[in-house]
Amino acid sequence: MAKIQLGVIFGSRSCEHEVSVISGVQLARAADREKYDVWPIYIARDGRWYTGEKLLDIKTYTNFDPFAKGLRRVTLDLTAGSGALICYEQAKGLLAKGVTPVTLTRLDCVIPVMHGLNGEDGTLQGLLELANIPYSSSGVAGSAIGMDKIMMKQFFRGHGFPILPDTWALRSEWKKDPDMVIRRVEENLPYPVFCKPACLGSSIGVSRADNREKLKEALELAFSYDRRVLIEKGLDKPVEVNCSVLGYDDEVAASVTEMPTTSGGDFLDFADKYLSTGASKGMASLKRVMPAPVGDKMIARIEDVSKRVFRAMDCKGVARIDYMLTGEDELYITEINTIPGSMAFYLWNESGLPYPKLIDKLVEYARRAWEDKNENDYAFTSDILNGVVLGGKKGGKL
């Protein structure tokens, strides 16, 4: 049986670029080479795409050299169903001029391992939809909602999921009248509050404010990363718990629930998640307790809510839902990560599904979703074009 040509796309123009690189290399190295020809596809900070075995060495990225031996600039053929990964090479021969396209492979499936904008937010998913290539992450709508914290909370609120009170503001409002923004926050929310860039992850730009002076600092920081900022009510010494969900359509399963630990603060910042152990292995490096010691009843509730969120957003592949839990057993959703750090493989490994098998499930769900989509009829025809004269007196109005 021919191997599956598996593209693993990571990197991109995002504040979470390095985190995506770690997660992408982890996955590419974990894939079963008896089943897959793995094509690591790295999107550099300038947006150029590269492939090559050298990309599986994490040291390649400490001082990335696009001209290094073994790397090739590539692009994806967007012709529906082509799947061609194309490299442009110098034409050979005495009379040859310019460059000629060379097809390196035809991808059977793509696993996006993107964190943040330009990849996790529906943009890459839209490209893969146009190219009609099976891909493992949530679709365009679910990815976009999951990336935007303001829209995400409105979605959760509409479905009756448990969330904390919040408000939001625009950078233009902040520049025009910062006192008005501060008054709005104070009229709607008690201190402490957390300020979060709307479309960023990995806790970048997130900070706590316990008074007006700290709120001004927190808003300045958040607005430096995004033009829209979510301001959310804080809790008194909450416990963070996370649960991953895996599946597609009517097949949905929840992982073990974890309780990450911080370095002493009251929320997990970037350093807790990725720098606390020195040599980072992404989210897999984080100190955690599994299963979370919150009682069987709460675990069952977390699993139930997680699966309902996954279904409501029509997610696909693997996601992670993060929660805050109070001492009074009040549960609140913090966010959903439609492409979680390290693909949450550590949670599934603890649940009895090793990383190579998790990758198999991602490919399976990607191809099932692709087959379902291709059952749809996209060829509706009509007589609307007959007799149309643009700018004339005949035909329908356009």
Image (cartoon, grey):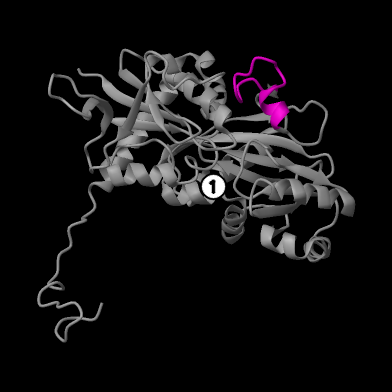
Q: What amino acid type is highlighted by mark number 1? A: Gly
Indicate the secondary structure of the residue bearing disc 1: helix
Q: Could one spot residue 260 in this view of the protein?
A: no
Which residue matches tag 1? 146
Please tell me which residue lies in front, 354 or 220: 220
The answer to which quarter of the image holds residue 377 is bottom left
Q: Residue at x 27, y 42 (%)?
A: 78
Q: Residue at x 14, y 78 (%)?
A: 389
Q: Quadrant of the C terminus?
A: bottom left
* Residue 200 in the figure: left or right of residue 47: right
For residue 169: magenta?
Answer: no
Q: Residue at x 17, y 83 (%)?
A: 392
Region rendered in magenta: 270-287
For residue 272: magenta?
Answer: yes
x, y percent for residue 90 = 24, 23
Give the main secondary structure of the magenta stretch: loop
Q: Residue at x 72, y 21 (%)?
A: 276
**In this rendering, is residue 295 above or below 145?**
above
Residue at the front extreme, as displayed: 95
Q: Quadrant of the N terminus?
A: top left
